[in-house]
Image (cartoon, rainbow, N blue to C red):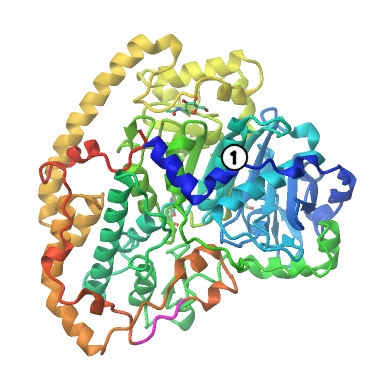
């Protein structure tokens, strides 16, 4: 399967990553750091305490062939924390085509912009833990551009060009070229980042003379767009689970039929992947109409005009219909004038005349014949730590889709992360939960939107601690600390954070970790250099593996037996409940049971559906090609995004394509064992990398 992946990637052009040495490494150093220093910004002196003022560089870097990438580097001042050294994170916003200023001024950057259009300090800024470098890329995004040359067309080139950027960047910051590198980003960066990481690793592994290698250690993606069709399939279940649409509502049968067709697409794609011929496709049209239909059918027409639609980035908020979140986040209205201010532009070394827009259309950028980045994960995980985090209020890249996508993924010889969740405590409060194993963590954050650092800045910063394994853990919990309490971690006399857990088997791991950390002087990030201690199901570390392992295994068996029993009861109970709920609770879209349920339900709705179709006249074609790309891309206020939804009043039913739907059309057989034995499906290879 590895070869197959390689072949597929070669076909797709990724092989090009390992060809042709870029010449940019040899670009003579003509820039000096002073040219990029950011000396002042409106509000910096008044609103930000001296000890909080970061050291910053910004401007455009030439990366060859007339292409210039704009970057903004933020590092801590002399008050830097001990663990914050020799490590850099490069941050990407989504789109494609959304600018770094989303991240830098509304999320995990050092500042927010207030109503006076001045900076205020963001006390959840990530630069306290790592140097942060925000980059507008690919060219055409934000302040990055090309001089008369072509824009990038393909995701693979995004990786190649990013390496050119790194080469230029480290010409300038040559003292830092050996630092540990992390990539972070959100939304559509879920496509960029794995492709960039792949390109960097391929270059490192190629080991060619004259080419710098980069110490890439890990990547983190927030509410990522990683496996589009699979994620599109989880919109309906998410709406139902969150109570955003009623199964009695007008369009429900239509929604079900769309969902079912998308299910078929996903099943077919999975089958193709298993046969070694992955489908090179981002979004299938049978999947990408689902969300616009949900937005349409979940309207509240009795609400004031600006609250008719659910905000698809945070379902606790509302917006006018068809914008449905495009007006969010609210800070955007201050960011625009801030970036038009000459004082700001001079300070950031923005070239004269460069126009800023939150998200721009990348002309010619194409996703045709591109494999979704999920296919890159199994190989990446052999060499990197990956943390996926997800705000649970987001619809567009919702956590159900992420969980389902990971459950199917096979890497490190096993499939998925299993059912076991561990509570995540930050500063001793529960803030979400974590599943982690074999270099992958999936983190769900409560009460957070599509832009987690926007809603929960201080908590979001602890994602870095999860990424570098700077946390205490037991079998049930993972605990991180606010930065003010960092020193505790290195203090041998301090009690372990999770006191009450000390007597349980899992705590020995947490405790030994704490004491290991403390015996190694002051640098808690040292823990990263050890073999990362991962999930309960993996080998515990050295000193306590005898006892710890036995009791762990016993415990696992107990948990398993209880889970199986509960599962049985659950299934019985749920069988008597309404089916859509059943579908969701039973999870995986690929169980036979589920499909039976859907077919069942469709039989029930079939007549209504046809009748409804007739009421509305002939069905129309899907109008929303590329809709998701635009919507995703926009993280808000995107002027491009504003053109997007056009759900006609006659509504797109698309039943014409189906002809006379018959129940059998919706039964997609799984060739796995007995219906009802859910544990069976974990043994079925669905997505394999070995
Ligand atoms: C950080 O800022 C938020 C919002 O201004 C505030 O509620 C919180 O208490 C601050 N936290 C710290 C540690 O200063
Ligand atoms: C996890 O990543 C490390 C490199 O950071 C690698 O040595 C290890 O084999 C990986 N683990 C798995 C299960 O692939
Ligand atoms: C989430 O928000 C709700 C209401 O806004 C609040 O009651 C709850 O405590 C919050 N939960 C967490 C984990 O912050």
Residue at image position (79%, 47%) is: 56
Q: Main secondary structure of the magenta part?
A: loop
Q: How many labels were placed on the picture?
A: 1
Q: Is residue 157 magenta?
A: no
Residue 158 image position (x, y, % from top left): 60, 52
Q: Does the residue labelled 1 lie within 8 Å of ligand 2?
A: no
Query: Residue 490: image x %, image y %?
Result: 61, 21
Q: Tell me which residue sits at (59%, 70%) in the image.
A: 638
Question: Measured along the vertical axis of the image, is residue 281 above or below residue 404?
Answer: below
- Magenta-colored stretch includes residue 647: yes
- Residue visible at 69% across and 31% down? 179
Q: In this view, does 446 lie to the left or right of 192?
A: left
Q: Is residue 445 visible?
A: no
State the residue in front, 109 or 138. 138
Whether residue 571 is visible here, answered yes or no, is: yes
Residue 442's image quarter?
top left
State whether residue 639 is above or below residue 370.
Answer: below
Badge 1 element = helix
Quadrant where the C terminus lies? top left
Front-most of 682 and 30? Answer: 30
In the rendered image, which residue does mark 1 sit on? 18
**Above-or-below relation of 554 to 16:** above
Q: Which residue is drawn at 45% across and 27% down?
A: 473
Circle 1 Cα neighbour tier, 10 Å, few/some/many (<14 / 14–19 / ≥20): some
Magenta stretch: give its range.
Answer: 645-649
Q: In this view, does 275 lie to the left or right of 6?
A: left
Query: Considering the image in quadrants, where does the N terminus appear?
Result: top left
The picture places residue 321, in percent across and down from the top left corner, at 45, 79
């Amino acid at each position: 399967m590895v070869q197959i992946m390689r072949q597929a990637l070669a076909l797709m052009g990724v092989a090009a990553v390992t060809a042709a040495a870029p010449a940019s490494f040899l670009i003579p150093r003509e820039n000096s750091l002073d040219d990029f220093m950011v000396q002042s910004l409106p509000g910096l002196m008044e609103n930000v305490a001296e000890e909080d003022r970061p050291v910053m560089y910004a401007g455009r870097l030439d990366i060859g062939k007339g292409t210039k990438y704009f970057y903004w580097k933020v590092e801590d001042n002399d008050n830097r924390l001990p663990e914050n050294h020799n490590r850099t994170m490069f941050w990407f916003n989504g789109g494609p085509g959304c600018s770094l200023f989303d991240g830098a001024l509304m999320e995990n950057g050092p500042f927010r912009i207030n109503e006076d259009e001045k900076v205020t300090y963001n006390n959840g800024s990530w630069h306290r833990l790592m140097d942060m470098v925000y980059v507008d890329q690919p060219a055409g995004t934000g302040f990055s551009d090309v001089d008369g040359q072509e824009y990038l067309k393909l995701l693979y080139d995004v990786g190649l060009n990013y390496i050119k950027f790194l080469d230029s960047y480290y010409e300038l910051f040559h003292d830092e070229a050996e630092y540990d590198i992390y990539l972070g980003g959100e939304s559509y960066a879920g496509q960029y980042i794995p492709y960039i990481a792949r390109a960097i690793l391929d270059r490192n592994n190629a080991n060619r003379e004259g080419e710098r290698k980069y110490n890439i250690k890990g990547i983190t993606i927030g509410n990522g767009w990683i496996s589009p069709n699979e994620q599109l399939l989880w919109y309906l279940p998410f709406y139902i689970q969150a109570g955003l649409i009623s199964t009695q509502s007008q369009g429900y049968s239509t929604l079900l039929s769309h969902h079912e067709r998308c299910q078929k697409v996903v099943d077919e794609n999975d089958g193709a992947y298993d046969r070694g011929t992955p489908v090179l496709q981002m979004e299938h049209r049978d999947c990408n109409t689902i969300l616009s239909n949900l937005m349409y059918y979940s309207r509240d027409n009795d609400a004031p005009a600006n609250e008719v639609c659910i905000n698809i980035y945070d379902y606790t908020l509302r917006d006018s219909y068809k914008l449905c979140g495009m007006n969010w986040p609210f800070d955007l209205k201050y960011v625009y004038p801030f970036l038009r201010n000459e004082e700001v532009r001079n300070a950031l070394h923005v070239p004269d005349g460069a126009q800023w827009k939150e998200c721009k259309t990348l002309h010619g950028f194409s996703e045709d014949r591109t494999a979704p980045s999920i296919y890159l994960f199994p190989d990446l995980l052999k060499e990197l730590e990956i943390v996926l985090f997800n705000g649970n209020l987001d619809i567009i890249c919702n956590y159900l889709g992420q969980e389902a996508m990971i459950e199917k993924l096979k890497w490190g010889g096993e499939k998925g992360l299993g059912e076991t969740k561990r509570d995540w405590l930050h500063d001793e409060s529960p803030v979400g939960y974590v599943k982690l194993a074999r270099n992958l963590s999936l983190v769900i954050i409560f009460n957070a939107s599509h832009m987690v650092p926007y809603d929960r800045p201080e908590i979001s910063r602890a994602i870095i601690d999860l990424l570098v394994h700077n946390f205490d853990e037991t079998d049930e919990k993972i605990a991180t600390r606010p930065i003010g309490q960092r020193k505790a971690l290195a203090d041998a006399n301090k009690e372990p954070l999770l006191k009450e857990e000390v007597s349980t088997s899992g705590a020995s791991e947490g405790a030994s970790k704490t004491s290991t950390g403390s015996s190694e002087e002051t640098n808690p990030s040292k823990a990263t250099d050890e073999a990362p201690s991962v999930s309960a199901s993996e080998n515990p570390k050295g000193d306590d593996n005898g006892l710890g392992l036995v009791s762990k295994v016993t415990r696992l068996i107990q948990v398993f037996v209880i889970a199986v029993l509960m599962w049985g009861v659950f299934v019985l109970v749920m069988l008597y409940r309404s089916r859509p709920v059943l579908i969701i609770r039973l999870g995986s879209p690929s169980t036979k049971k589920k499909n039976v349920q859907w077919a069942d339900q469709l039989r029930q709705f079939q007549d209504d559906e046809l009748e409804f179709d007739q009421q509305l006249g002939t069905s129309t074609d899907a109008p929303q090609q590329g809709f998701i790309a635009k919507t995703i891309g926009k993280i808000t206020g995107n002027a491009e995004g504003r053109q997007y939804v056009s759900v006609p009043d006659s509504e797109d039913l698309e039943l014409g394509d189906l002809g006379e739907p018959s129940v059998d059309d919706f039964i997609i057989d799984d060739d796995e064992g007995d219906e009802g034995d859910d544990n069976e499906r974990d043994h079925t290879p669905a997505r394999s990398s070995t």
